[in-house]
Amino acid sequence: MKYNTKNKKLNINDFQHPFDKRAVDAVTKVPGFEKLIEFISSNSIEKAYSLINDSSKMKVTKEMSSKIFEMMSEAAEMFDVNYIPEVFIERDYNMKVTLNGIKKPHIIFSSSFLEQISDEMLWNVIVSEYSGIEAKHGTIKFLDEVLKFVKGAIPFGVDVALDVAINDWYRNRAYTYDRAILLSSESFEMAAKHILFGEVSKDVLETLQLDKPDNTYLEQSREFFGRTGAEGLYQKFNTVFSRNQWLASRYMELYNWYNSGEYHDVLEGSVR
Amino acid sequence: MMTYDSLYGIKPEDYQHPGEKIAMMALKKLPLLDIVMAKVLDAKIQVDTYAEVVGSCYRITEKTNPRVYGLYKLALARLGIKEEYPLFSEMGYDYNAYATGVDKPFIVLRSSVIANYSDGELLNVIGHEIGHIKSGHLLYHNMARSLNSILGSLGGVAQAASVALQYALMEWHRNSEYTADRAGLIAAADINVANTETMKMLGHSDNIPDIDFSVDKVMKQAEDFETDASGIIGKLLYINYTAYASHPWSILRLKQINDWYNSGEYEKVVRMYKQD
């Protein structure tokens, strides 16, 4: 194993964030609904993804990058699954990774992301994308697409409520990804840096000691959560229609999980 | 690879894509075209656009950017054009460029294109835009851009008929891009840079390590690409993603320009006008 050097095995049920799991379970635990969504998705939106990706993005094959495919294979083995998602690159100045699809998941890296990321971090990100597939994130994303399509036919209050719920899930899924990166890297500093990657310049990111108990970002995050009154309300409700979680929230969630003992229990169980 | 400094005498018909010719014939058969054209010819539209560019972009001249200006002059000569059109640079991270104006055309390049493209790739982009001007595309491009607001001012049956006009215009617009890609190749005089330029739009970057972006690997994606327009869902998706698209998919552009090059037609055109 070149990347999964300790031959770790991960199971999404051991570390998926409860807020993320709650939303996914609300959909997948309805009898037959998951299969129905998978069928509709594979015969509609996944055909659209295929068309858009193959026509307008660069497909990365095994011949083009043995490195990426080696990482994918090891991640698949880590989760004890046998699929390798298709990989695409799209020209984008924003640093981002997108996971789509249910029956045929695929990953899209922005060109800026691949330009700036180290091999080590890329490996950890691939592990987190696999955790997203295992956590059935494709299911909620599909429902999101369906909602956009049928919005006009849904009564006003209901569509707003659904929007809020889906946005809430988008924000909370980041917590699962962050946990996956921590479990893969076994480095709180690396996982925390990943949260800030793309939001803070590279040279500043190098100097931050995000794992130290007296680090300034921890102080900043605590201050963020300590805000009360109108400021506290603003923080709570400002994100209602946003799909991006506060960085300070992600950092504190991960920090608390890391220090709760739960992380160490999962990690111990993962090393066979 | 042939090299040449100028191809004076080259005509737009020499490199026009057959799809563009067919699409233009279909477009001219449609009613409403004259009405819409009259509105587009409204000088105000053109004046506003130029004012915005002069006010917010910087003009590329021999003094302000000798590298790009030199390439621009070479592209003009290779496309047989003696006059110059104003050339500007506009701040932007996306890889894009455009030509606009009808009586007084001008060209705008995004700053990221200037910063990140090689000389050959820049020649390809500049040649592409000059190709639009030389081939007389700009009037219809302006029409496509203004179509929604123009059609909104018409009512009743005219609005219903306008759907056919919009579809036909966009079909022509996409084919005009294939024609301009051929002009780009003529300006660049190198199929490899024409390919790498298109690949950059797909996501290729010289700064991504450990990925083999060689053209033959990417051409496999172009060769394997099939639009699955079978079945009702396939057909609906295809129409949905193409009907109002002004540009063809990049993978199809890669295929089209390589087909033209490999057919020997590009070389035939260049040999006809190449001055030794």
Image (cartoon, coloured by chain):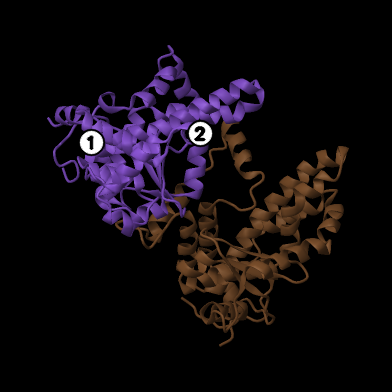
Chain colours: A purple, B brown
Image quarter hosting the C terminus of chain A: top left
The furthest residue to the front: A229
Residue in front for this viewpoint, A75 or A25 = A25
Compare residues B123 and A186 and report the one nearer the observer.
A186
| Marks 2,1: beta carbons within 8 A | no
**A126 left or right, relative to B107:** left
Residue that mark 1 sits on: A183
Query: Can marks 2 and 1 be said to lie on one chain?
Result: yes
Q: Position of residue A14 (x, y in %)?
A: 25, 25
The three-letter code of the residue at mark 2 reads Ala
Q: Can the viewer see residue B176?
A: yes
Subunit ID for the residue under disc 2: A
Residue A19 drawn at (x, y percent): 38, 25
Q: Quadrant of residue B60?
A: bottom right
| Badge number at residue A230 | 2
**Count of numbered labels shown in the rendering:** 2
Q: Residue furthest top?
A: A31
For image coordinates 72% across by 45% down, the residue present is B167
Q: Is residue A28 above or below residue B120?
A: above
- The residues tagged by marks 2 and 1 sit, at their Cα atoms, a distance apart of 37 Å
Question: Mark 1 belongs to which amino acid?
Answer: Leu
Give the residue displayed 37% in from the left and 60% down from the top.
Answer: B214
Q: Which chain is home to disc 1?
A: A
Q: Earlier in the sequence, mark 2 or mark 1?
A: 1
What is the x, y in percent for residue A146?
A: 55, 27
Q: Is residue B49 above or below residue A61?
A: below
SS state under label 2: helix
* In this rendering, position of residue A100 left or right of residue B230: left
* Left or right: B6 in relation to A128: right
Q: Crowdedness of circle 2 by 10 Å Cα count: few (<14), some, many (20+)? A: few
Nearer to the camera, B41 or B221: B41
